[in-house]
Image (tube, rainbow, N blue to C red):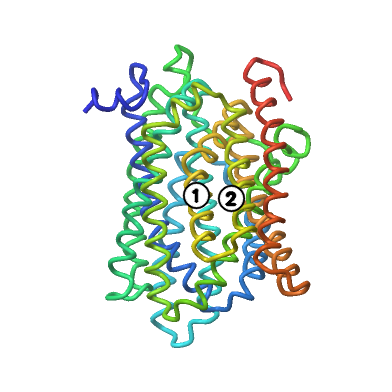
Amino acid sequence: MMQFLRRLVVLEPGEAPALLASFATLFLTFASYTILRPVRDALGITSGTENIPYLFWGVFVVMLLLQPVYGFLTSRFARSVFLPWTYIFFAVNLLGFWAWFHASEDHTWIARTYFVWVSVFNLFVVAAFWSLMADVFNREQAGRLFGFIWAGASTGGLVGPAIAKKLAVPLGAVNLLPLSAGLLLAALGAMGFVIAWSRRQGTQAVAGAPAMPERGVGGSAFAAFSQVVRSPYLLGIVAFVVLMTWVSTFLYLEQAAFVKQAIKSTDERAAFFAGIDLYVQAASLIIQFLLFARLFRWFGMRVLLAAVPVLMMLGYATFALAPSFMVLVVVYAVRRVADYAITRPCRDSLFTVVSREEKYQAKSLIDTFAYRGGDAVSGSLYKAITGGLGAGPAAVGWLGAVVAAAWAVLALALGRGYQARSSGTRG
């Protein structure tokens, strides 16, 4: 097993247990989430594609309300306390939604609430996990290990959609929720091992220095906002995330409009989205296992950060020239593969050169509040240009290409800031 693992990733002594437990945590978390995502997308269409931009605003408002709560928890409680309770909280919520769906015949408002909740769940749970990773592993380890750990997401992303695709129609999409809750609780067990390993030796212990104390990070519930405003580097990450969401949301809403016309049943829509997820995660897994660490070593952060924006600029231009459903599905799938395999590991590595407080507080703000703020604004923009101005798919394609070009320029600048911080120059 160890020999096989060493072929996939460069390991230093003592890292394997934490690496495998981190992989398992993300694997189970994403298996749980990717069971829920096809159900969310199918129910989002059921509640009306014209209402999806409003649902994005609902997610944003919820993030705005929850961010101070999350900031308070991270400032006052050790990670071994608030991270497990975050997972338990969302698992209980899943069981509550399952009971609610079965208690009511009209699912319209339940579906809308569930759509908002799943988006919040995904960002908070994943943000909490990667805050832990940025705390447990240092910058040098991140370059070697984060690609492999992110492969846990794609592996879980294969299992979750496979379950959803197989069971959504015979069992009913809603009845997948308790299974998702069980996987989330299993992820909690693997996370406990990572926390215990970090407590025993931690990132700094591997390098021969004292381990990080097990405590809250301090500060106030609103500390994340001031951390971001004071740091040009963190503001750059905010802008990067916002432009990334614009590129994604335009494609997501275009796909939803096509699927609404082509597939009428909610359970069949869930199975369709699960099938797309299955192929996306399989491709992402191959890249993460076999290529990411080598690409990071060969080209460095700047090139990899800018590679996906450039790829999406070309993808949007292709869709603008040939605005068909097949081209749309391929471009959106390529974007998601590139996001999982390249952009996300790079984006999480950006936080290895910030303070511990910023890893838990500012990172959560950016991964949740800024992310869904970008979704909300871009969703409203999409609604305005397609509904208000009557723009067609080709116009959406050209607008997306322009946004992706701006994203590429910003990625290069952000990569420069990362390199400056890595070499000891703060930005």
Q: Label 1 sits on what residue type?
A: Val
Query: How crowded is the residue under tag 1: few (<14 C-alpha within 10 Å), some, or many (20+)?
Result: some
Which residue in the structure is indicated by mark 1? Answer: 334
Which residue in the structure is indicated by mark 2? Answer: 315
- Residue 404 lies, in percent from the top left, at 67, 46
Return the disc, 1 or 2, that comes first in the chain's sequence: 2
Q: CA distance from mark 1 to mark 2?
A: 8 Å
- Residue 35 lies, in percent from the top left, at 38, 61
| Any part of residue 72 in sight | no
Q: Is residue 273 left or right of residue 74?
A: left
Q: Is residue 45 left or right of residue 26?
A: right
Nearer mark to the viewer, of 1 and 2? 2
Q: Is residue 279 above or below residue 77?
A: below
Q: Is residue 423 above or below residue 392?
A: above
Q: In the picture, residue 288 is in which quadrant?
A: top left
View extreme (left): residue: 1
